[in-house]
Amino acid sequence: MDVTTMRAWRVTTPGPVDGAGTAPPLALSEAPVPVPAPGELLVRVEACGVCRTDLHVTEGDLSVHHDHVVPGHEVVGRIAGYGRAVSGWEQGERVGVAWLRSTCGRCRWCLRGTENLCPYARFTGWDGDGGYAEYVTVPADYAYRLPDDVPAVDLAPLLCAGIIGFRALRRAALPEGGRLGLYGFGGSAHLCAQVAIGEGATVHVLTREPAAQRLALALGAASAGGAYDAPPEPLDAAVLFAPVGDLVPVALRALDRGGILSIAGIHLSDVPPLTYESELFYEKEIRSVTANTRDDGRTFLALAARHGVRATTHPYPLDRAVEALRDLKAGRFDGAAVLVP
Ligand SMILES: [Zn+2]
Ligand SMILES: [Zn+2]
């Protein structure tokens, strides 16, 4: 490879992206192309999605794990080099780099197939440099193979919004052909809905936004109503995407006997007191969701390819990353922002 330097956005001093009169908390600079360590791939970035977590890292709500980290964990790119001890990957092959960068492989959670709970997990764009750059490295064991026939911009949001939404769907343990409720209908939920519908579920969307309700119906949802409305039939499972604790009892009441409510968000406002008889009895369950396993990622990406799952995207050139983060914070666009070097 003859290119030796690249442009990359690094977090300088975490703070508001929209602070008036202050320097933005991240800066674009020229830097050496990273050298892949043993077991790592070097990836030339084609597109990198802008996730709300990037905003949290940039603004300091999540304290940076290393100084001057490069944000971004929805990376689509092509293999441009290898470290030692990498096999089974081709130069130029398209790969995805997602939030989960590595796990220990030895703790009780890793050993029982729940590496998403590994206390020693490391994350892209937080512990390791991410994709707001022209090149990124990734441990080969944590890279995903991606199809060539879909634009990179369209694939990027699948790598976080898509995978995490799918983990939440799995946690809801929807029976085959079952009735699924989705509370809230943003980036993650609209990808989750496409997989569920593709797999034969009947999906009811409950959200306050009329535009989101229309999108839900256009994607094949059986019904779309207000977040506090009762769905037209009892639900076998539900996923709460809106970070609104008040919706927990609402969703529990909508569940049929044995139904499971999965809570997709990292944050949730306080849950009001629950009424045992109407909201928990008949073996209803509440489950939280933490990150994802590699199996979640691989399974989701295979289903997304099979069912032609598409994200609504909003591309920005790489040098407008600060603007993309500001627009995300202000809710200025529908769908997902994606940076393109
Ligand atoms: Zn994310
Ligand atoms: Zn572990």
Image: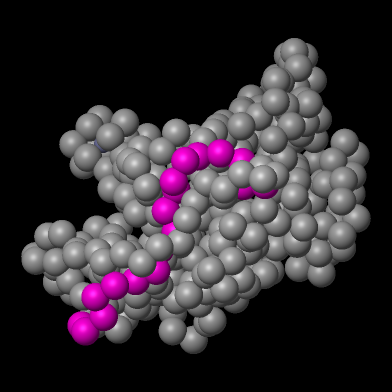
Residue at 75 percent across and 46 percent down: it is 184
Residue at 61 percent across and 32 percent down: it is 267
Residue 36 falls in image quadrant: bottom left
**Which of these two is toward me, 333 or 217?**
333
**Which of these two is toward me, 276 or 48?**
48
Q: Is residue 62 visible?
A: yes
Q: Percent x, y for residue 290?
A: 48, 37
Residue at 76 percent across and 17 percent down: it is 272
Left or right, 77 with respect to 90, comes to: right
In magenta segment, residue 291: no
- In the rendered view, would you say 129 is above or below 108? below
Main SS of residues in magenta: loop
Residue at 29 percent across and 76 percent down: it is 79
- In the rendered view, would you say 27 is above or below 218? above
- In the rendered view, would you say 131 is above or below 175? below
Q: Which colour scheme is used?
A: one colour
Q: Is residue 170 visible?
A: no
**Which of these two is toward me, 78 or 263?**
78
Which region is colored magenta? Answer: 1-18
